[in-house]
Amino acid sequence: MRGLINRCEDDEAASLRIKCRHFCRELYDGIFPLGAGDSPSHTSSYLLAAMVDLHADKLEIEGSRMTAGEREEELEKANKLCQTLAKEVDVIRKHYWNYLDRDLTRRFGNADTKKA
């Protein structure tokens, strides 16, 4: 999904990121009904990975305009998703998700977060 968004014009990309964030959040929160025999939508590694990408993009693009609290909240959401992927959903790639978790904290965390 990140590749598609990045190929859009800047004004379209910003709008598309917001729509994708909202859509993924709805899927994650289970707003859309599941069919018989379906597992909860939030266990999809593809959905969670897309959400991590969207949170990382938001930190990269809007981070300088965000308050410290907003950055910390966005980073925490991305970190929790990485941990869920590493421990429960996509265990086969746990090292990747742990790396990404550490990398996001290194790049966007405040001094207190980086020490933890």
Image (spheres, rainbow, N blue to C red):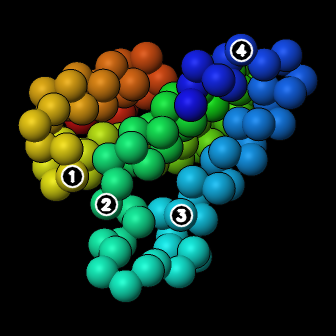
- Residue 6, percent across and down? 67, 17
Mark 4 or mark 3: whose residue is earlier in sequence: 4
State the CA–CA distance, disc 2 to disc 1: 6 Å
* Residue 43 circle label: 2
* Residue 60 circle label: none
**From the viewer's perspective, is 51 left or right of 92?**
right
* Residue 27 circle label: 3
Q: Residue at position x 53%, y 63% from top?
A: 27
Q: Residue at position x 48%, y 39% from top?
A: 50
Report helix, strand or loop for mark 1. Answer: helix
* Residue 7 circle label: 4
Say if residue 72 shows up in the picture: no
Say if residue 112 shows up in the picture: yes
- Residue 52, percent across and down? 45, 38
State the image quarter where residue 25 is shown. Answer: bottom right
Residue at the spot of label 1: 89
State the image quarter where residue 63 is shown. Answer: top right
Badge 3, how many Cα within 10 Å: few under 14, some, many 20+?
A: some
**From the viewer's perspective, is 3 left or right of 111?**
right
State the CA–CA distance, disc 2 to disc 3: 10 Å
Mark 2 or mark 3: whose residue is earlier in sequence: 3
Q: Nearer the viewer, residue 23 or 81?
A: 23
